[in-house]
Amino acid sequence: MAKSKIVKVSEQIAEKFTDGYKKIEDTVVGAYTKIEDGFVDNFLTKDGETVEEAKERLKKEIESK
């Protein structure tokens, strides 16, 4: 059965809305990650430790409590 014009337009709108939302979400999450990495790098890393190693160490410290 053929889809009506309204259904087709509604699907196109839903797809564009979803794509727009995903772009916004990716931008926000990316910005947060940059801020988080900067904070960890400046305040929570120990001598010679990378940001990833510091995050893993902190995660283990929290889990052990």
Image: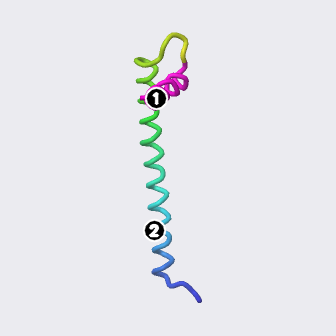
Provide residue 28's location: percent of width, then percent of height: 42, 42
Which is more toward the observer, 58 or 34?
58
- Quadrant where the image shows the C terminus: top left
Q: Nearer the viewer, mark 1 or mark 2?
A: 1
Q: Residue furthest top?
A: 47
Q: CA distance from mark 1 to mark 2?
A: 48 Å
Residue density around tag 2, few if under 14, some if 14–19, many if 20 or more, within 10 Å = few
* Circles 1, 2 touching at the beta carbon (< 8 Å): no
Judge whether residue 63 is colored magenta. Answer: yes
- Which residue: 47% across, 50% down? 23
Above or below: residue 47 compared with residue 32: above
Above or below: residue 30 compared with residue 2: above
Give the colouring mode of the picture.
rainbow
Q: Secondary structure at mark 1?
A: loop
Q: Residue furthest right?
A: 1
Judge whether residue 46 is colored magenta. Answer: no
Q: Secondary structure at mark 2?
A: helix
- Amino acid under label 1? Ser
The circle drawn on residue 13 is 2
- Which residue: 46% across, 34% down? 33
- Quadrant where the image shows the N terminus: bottom right
Mark with earlier residue (1, 2): 2
The circle drawn on residue 28 is none
Magenta-tinted stretch: 50-65
Which is more toward the observer, 43 or 28?
43
The residue at which mark 1 appears reads as: 64
- Amino acid under label 2? Ile
- Which residue: 57% across, 87% down? 2
Which is more toward the observer, 9 or 39?
39
Provide residue 22's location: percent of width, then percent of height: 48, 53
